[in-house]
Image (cartoon, grey):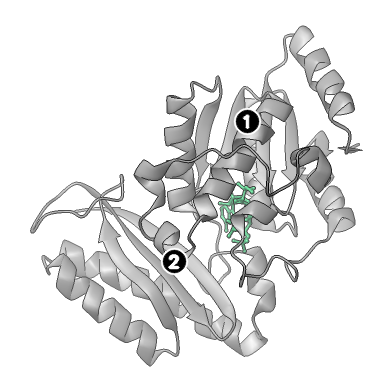
Amino acid sequence: MIETISELAALRERVSQWHREGLRVGFVPTMGNLHEGHFSLVSLARQHADRVVASVFVNPTQFGPNEDFARYPRTPEADAKGLGAAGCDVMWLPSVETMYPYGVEATVHVQVPAVSETLEGAHRPGHFDGVATVVSRLFNQVQPDVAVFGRKDYQQLAVIRYMVRDLAFPVELIGADIVREANGLAMSSRNQYLSPQEREQAAAIHRCLQAMRESVQAGRTREAVEAQARETLVTAGFEPDYAVVRRPDLTEPGAGEGGAQVALIAARLGRTRLIDNLEFMV
Ligand SMILES: Nc1ncnc2c1ncn2[C@@H]1O[C@H](COP(=O)(O)OP(=O)(O)OP(=O)(O)O)[C@@H](O)[C@H]1O
Ligand SMILES: CC(C)(CO)[C@@H](O)C(=O)[O-]
Ligand code: BAL
């Protein structure tokens, strides 16, 4: 039976009891409106821990003023059911006041400038400050031994890795594979904003990532691959924010460089902004 906890004292009591019993605690942070992608994170956490906590918190500090904070889907009852079925022990459901006791404006910020300013950070100014700020306090609240993040949010995982190392959080990080719909579309809460026709159209992002991988592996220059990808996306009805090839640390690979690389896309389809990526070897 999953337990929903909204008071910090009760969460602390539950987790410290587990730690006293010598149990390893896994943690999956989310913004709720959960789908199979999130549940795969819970399953992975279960493989690495004896007990699993998942948080559901739509974090105001990571949304820009013109973004979808107000309309972001909030479905806590369905989330609790799904988490319970996936093997989660506690759903941590804090209020904004619990998360930000001095208020959102007056909060202590955690910033990770080294990884935050490019790509998503360039298009969503302040986004990763909000993510690092909330994840640092979630780690302090939950005190997990291991935390699982999806590789769909590739740059987010890089930001969290940097923060964990730099601030010496005693948390092991695990990146989970991207879970996709049958047509290749990466699962995402924001897919709910898409019409049935747009859902089909949105699968073009994954096909475009695959084409980018093949072109890089065939020896085309990064610049040519990126230009072609933008053109493909525009032709398919998207407004791309970026379509790029990067090293795993998100720096630009040199001409003809081999090794591990990642193609990343962020693009708007109507009012919906989607991100996806594909890791590959050259
Ligand atoms: N399709 C997926 N496969 C693997 N992990 C995922 C997937 N979708 C989300 N996640 C991971 O779940 C965690 C919580 O993400 P979040 O609640 O923002 O879900 P989301 O579906 O990505 O929502 P959004 O539409 O806001 O991007 C993150 O670590 C994210 O990378
Ligand atoms: C990690 C996270 C839960 C922080 O709000 C969020 O950015 C997300 O859902 O990926
Ligand atoms: N999945 C990352 C959360 C966000 O887009 O704000």
Query: Position of 85 compared to 52: left or right?
Result: right
Neighbor class of circle 1 (other Cα within 10 Å; few <14, some 14-19, many 20+) is few
- Figure quadrant of the N terminus: top right
- What kind of element bears circle 1? helix
Q: Which residue ends up furthest to the left in the rendered image?
A: 256
Instruction: Name the residue located 47 percent from the left edge and 44 percent from the top edge.
Output: 157
Instruction: Name the residue located 8 percent from the left edge and 59 percent from the top edge.
Output: 255
- The answer to whether 145 is drawn above or below residue 69 in the figure is above
| Label ID, residue 47 | 1
- Quote the CA–CA distance across marks 1 and 2: 35 Å
- What kind of element bears circle 2? helix
Instruction: Name the residue located 37 percent from the left edge and 87 percent from the top edge.
Output: 234
Q: Position of residue 166 (x, y in %)?
A: 43, 26
Can residue 94 be seen in this snapshot? no
- The answer to whether 210 is drawn above or below residue 262 in the figure is below
Query: Position of 176 compared to 118: left or right?
Result: right
Residue type, mark 2 in image: His
Looking at marks 1 and 2 on the same chain, the residue that comes earlier in the sequence is marked by 1
Query: Position of 199 compared to 46: left or right?
Result: left
Neighbor class of circle 2 (other Cα within 10 Å; few <14, some 14-19, many 20+) is some
| Label ID, residue 123 | 2
Instruction: Name the residue located 41 percent from the left edge and 89 percent from the top edge.
Output: 236
Quarter of the figure with residue 252: bottom left
Q: Nearer the viewer, residue 90 or 64?
A: 64
